[in-house]
Image: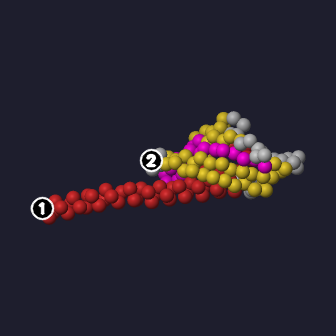
Amino acid sequence: MKSITASILALTVLSLCATPLVRAESAGGVEAKLKAMEDSWSAAQLQKDHGASVIDGFLATDYFGVNSKGKMQSKADVLEEIRGGTDTYTTSKNDSMEVHLYGAHVATVCGTSSETGKDKDGKEFSRSYAWADTWMERNGKWQCIGEAVTKLPAKE
């Protein structure tokens, strides 16, 4: 009887010790996945459609956010703005990102990004932004459910 009790106790202790390792490993996988999605989002601006097809797949149907001009936008508003964009991008990249997990299915990614290119009049621009995206995993798929963006002052 003591042998069975000791075995059960040992297995219980081992499983409790292994649980944080499993969580840490899966958390690292989620962080890497979300950072890769954010990088794809940024790089997509260089595409002919300015990333509308990529971003359409990332934004949840019930997405709601605030753009860099302070305008509140639904998913449809974001896609309309992207499709109507007249800027031509030369570069678009994320400069930094931090992922914060809130349980197994919700996370925020906070970061900064920069872009260069020309506006519709051919004038060159260089812009930097700080942003926070909220992601939720639904039915095995990570979707951006909210975002806030602010334009950073030009570097001197």
Q: Is residue 18 left or right of residue 39?
A: left
Residue name at image x 49 percent, y 51 percent: 139
Looking at the picture, tell me which residue is in the foreground, 117 or 76. Answer: 117
Give the residue type that dot 1 points to: Lys
Residue 140 sits above or below residue 153 on the image: below
Residue 56 location (% of width, % of height): 65, 50
Q: Is residue 135 magenta?
A: yes
Q: Which region shows up in magenta?
A: 126-146
Looking at the picture, tell me which residue is in the foreground, 104 or 51. Answer: 104
Residue name at image x 56 percent, y 44 percent: 134
The quadrant holding residue 133 is top right
Residue name at image x 69 percent, y 45 percent: 129
The residue indicated by pointer 1 is: 2
Looking at the picture, tell me which residue is in the foreground, 144 or 139. Answer: 144
The quadrant holding residue 63 is top right
Q: Secondary structure at mark 2?
A: loop
Q: Earlier in the sequence, mark 1 or mark 2?
A: 1
User: Mark 1 or mark 2, which is nearer to you?
Assistant: 1
Prevailing secondary structure class for the magenta stretch in the rendered image: strand
The residue indicated by pointer 2 is: 103
